[in-house]
Amino acid sequence: MIYTLTLNPAIDLFIETTQMKPNTVNRTNNSDVQANGKGINVSFILKRLGIDNTALGIGGGFTNQYIRDTLTQNQIPNQFITIDGLTRINVFTRVLDQQQEYKLVNKGPYVNQKAQTNLLKLLDKLQSGDWLCISGSFAQGIEPDILILIAQKMQQKKVRLVLDTSYAAVLETLRYQPYLIKPNEAELARWLKLPAQTTRTQLIHAAQELIQQGAQNVLLSLGAQGACLITTKRVYYGNAPEINVLNTAGSGDTMLGTFIAGKIQHLTEQANLRRSIAAGSDTAQQSWITDFTHVNALTSQIHINEIKE
């Protein structure tokens, strides 16, 4: 079984407005409310690709119940550790006359030690051969070092661990050989203290350092430039297709979920990277995550090359 874990889920409110002026009532053109959180997005993508999975998380209040109800409606089993606080609401506003998007992201509720202990007990139920995908930021009270403890547990249980979070504590998990790390270029540069202006070659070399330290695979997101897959044996690069960007939220989660699905479906590395880039790009040109209707068309624009030293 594949499990996703979201430690700071959210309801995302997406708004479109013609203009945004201070100290006045700005009427919106339309809005959309979505159950969100990076791990939750991965669960939705896996389900759309026919891969059964279970969504795990921590949350509270009516907002958390809305997220759980949405997962259930989409036939995704879910287990959440319930807390007293209220799962956060984020706001994303696209202003048409500025051609800009404003992102207002809240911290999330406080999670006490008892809830964290209950979470670790829940993870103890995972078995050999399972997958655990931890994505996104952590709610207040959860220290990044929890990743190290979880990584150690998953290695002992022979669970394939996937990490997509910006915390530098990811580096401390490498000794436990996580199956996949998915940084973007800014995260990788910050972790390894690379210069501000970093070339793709430098980023690939940095990703290879993660491999040398224990990561089994690195899926490196390069935004509008595409993505790289670095394994213990090979390096692949794929360009991004040309699209009209509408909403970048969820693009990385889509790429990751699609990539995990491709592993389950035994796609080749090249085919899996191509489809994953296409899916992430399709999400970026929609109001929410892709339904895969246009993914095949986008793959024709994507070329996968093996990078050799």
Image (cartoon, rainbow, N blue to C red):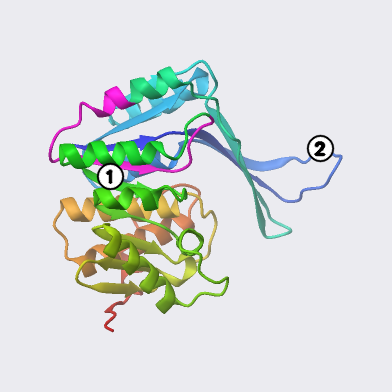
Q: Which residue is mark 2?
A: 25
What is the quadrant of the N terminus in the image? Answer: top left
Callout 2: 10 Å neighbours few (<14), some, many (20+)? few
Q: Nearer the viewer, mark 1 or mark 2?
A: 1
Residue in front for this viewpoint, 20 or 192: 192
Residue 226, image quadrant: bottom left
Q: Residue at coordinates 82% horizontally, 47% vertically from top-left?
A: 21
Residue in front for this viewpoint, 190 or 38: 190
Q: Position of residue 130 (x, y in %)?
A: 17, 39
Q: Position of residue 94 (x, y in %)?
A: 65, 51
- Magenta range is 120-140
Check the image and report above or below for 173 versus 153: below
Check the image and report above or below for 196 versus 178: below
Q: Which residue is mark 1?
A: 46
Identify the amino acid type marked 1: Leu
Q: Name the element at disc 1.
A: helix
Residue 51, image quadrant: top left
Horizontal side of residue 263 vs 61, given as left or right: left
Query: Farthest residue toward the top?
Result: 84
Q: Residue at coordinates 56% horizontally, 75% vertically from top-left?
A: 197
